[in-house]
Amino acid sequence: MHRQIDCFKAYDIRGQVPGALDEDIAWRIGRAFAAHLSPQSVVIGRDMRSSSDALSDALARGLNEGGVAVSDIGLCGTEEIYFACFNGGFDGGVMVTASHNPPDYNGMKLVREGARPLSRDTGLEDIRRLAEAGEFPAAANTPGTRKPYDSRDAYIQHLLTYVNLERLPPLKIVVNPGNGTAGAVLDALEPLLPFEFIKLHYAPDGSFPNGVPNPLLPDNRAPTTEAILDAGADLGLAWDGDFDRCFAFDHKGRFIEGYYIVGLLASAFLAKDSGARIVHDPRLVWNTVDVVNSAGGTAVQTKAGHAFIKERMRSEDAVYGGEMSAHHYFRNFAYADSGMIPWLLIAEIMGHTGQPLAALVDERIAKFPASGEINRRVSDATAVIAAIGERYRDAAVSEESVDGLSLAFDDWRFNLRASNTEPLLRLNVESRGNEDLMRAKTAELLAAIDGHG
């Protein structure tokens, strides 16, 4: 029976439960995944949301009825699905999660063999059409089974391959999973590392008693900052619900924009492989390009979004890719994003250099001050971008349309792009060593956007 399904986005599936996503839709997605990819084995997992158990059960039932053997990790992070998929040789993987969305949302992230992403252009739209139609072919195989699957020990050992344990200093670290699923992995790592963890908002709780786990929202950062100052910690870390994004705070409790973490991690990889390629998004670029070029690497710009970053990393064989949104991608992690590898690398850099995180990024922040991403709700994003382009284009020294509109001037630049999932415009502004100019141009652009919005 045909049913309209509106929870499919550009890169994943996400919507309110039960309005946009329910058990029938989850079952249809399982059947459609099986019909489209014809996998023999799929690994699934879920986050801590109250609806995740039921949706995961319905998904598994759909996969089984499509002839697929399901291995179920249970409560986990998205990257544990990625790891299990490429390490365990599965034909695909599905994570039931809505990451940092409100408690009444849920969704799914889908990958095929080797943890290759399924996005709108690479199969997700086909799966949506099959799920909507509800007319599934008879399974070529007998109904599949569902059994528990545990790859955490192998995953933990894999994480440790990214750092030299002897170079890790004895740090005191505030860790804030935001009541998401990162805590179990931190507990597994703790006895293997020379760190003292101060644990905050630690227990998985899908009602999010301490607010949605999204440290990109400034209001959500205060508890981590306060805990760092109270404990005299060396470092603070916070994650979103499924911990595929990692956010860092220095010993002063200051939130460090993901843009500067990209440059820091790029420099660490290039210190080991000076000719490597580094993939980055087009929202903020000058610091990353400067770091990569200075270290003898090649900076490769591509459209923002995990599907685009992963695809370009594969084609370039890039060792690392980073987005200012705190997604970090690694060649040895099947080009997928991880929220655990970045902070381990930061700790190693702190140990190797003997410097706190603040000292590692202050010079870069001063050299290329940035606004951070600012969102504005508009009725017609395309029209607003066109109007801003008309206003600023003549004075620009370069223009790019890799993702939205990027205009660069002698000593400042901006990127303006429409969200893939919401009726929002996203603005980023940076300058060459002039914070006052960056702030003035940011205010000027926001006024212009509001005037057209």
Image (cartoon, rainbow, N blue to C red):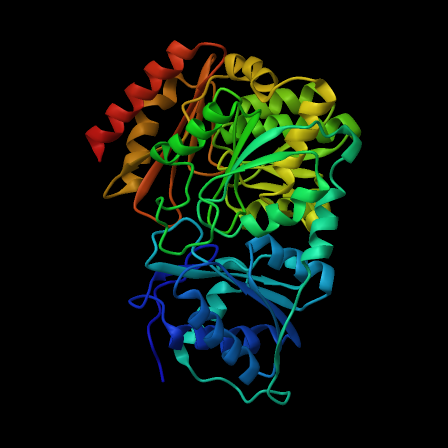
Q: Position of residue 395 (x, y in %)?
A: 39, 16
Q: Is residue 234 above or below residue 363?
A: below
In depth, the one of 138 and 352 nearer the eye is 352
Location of residue 263 with respect to 376 vertically, above or below: above
Between 367 and 135, the residue placed more toward the observer is: 367
| Residue 273 in sight | no
Total tally of numbered discs in the picture: 0
Residue 352: x %, y % from top left: 74, 23
Q: Is residue 89 visible?
A: yes
Q: Residue at x 25, y 25 (%)?
A: 448
Between residue 407 and residue 13, name the one nearer to us: 13
Side of 10 relative to 312 (left or right):
left
Residue at 43%, 72% (x, y): give it.
54
Q: Quadrant of the N terminus?
A: bottom left
Residue 103 lies in quadrant: bottom left
For the C terminus, the quadrant is: top left
In the image, taking residue 344 as reference, residue 204 lies left or right, namely left
Where in the figure is residue 400, as x and y percent of width and height? Answer: 48, 31
Farthest left residue? Answer: 451
Side (left or right) of 349 relative to 253: right
Identify the residue at image location x=69%, y=46%: 315
Q: Nearer the viewer, residue 347 or 370?
A: 347
Residue 55: quarter of image: bottom left
Percent x, y of residue 177? 49, 44
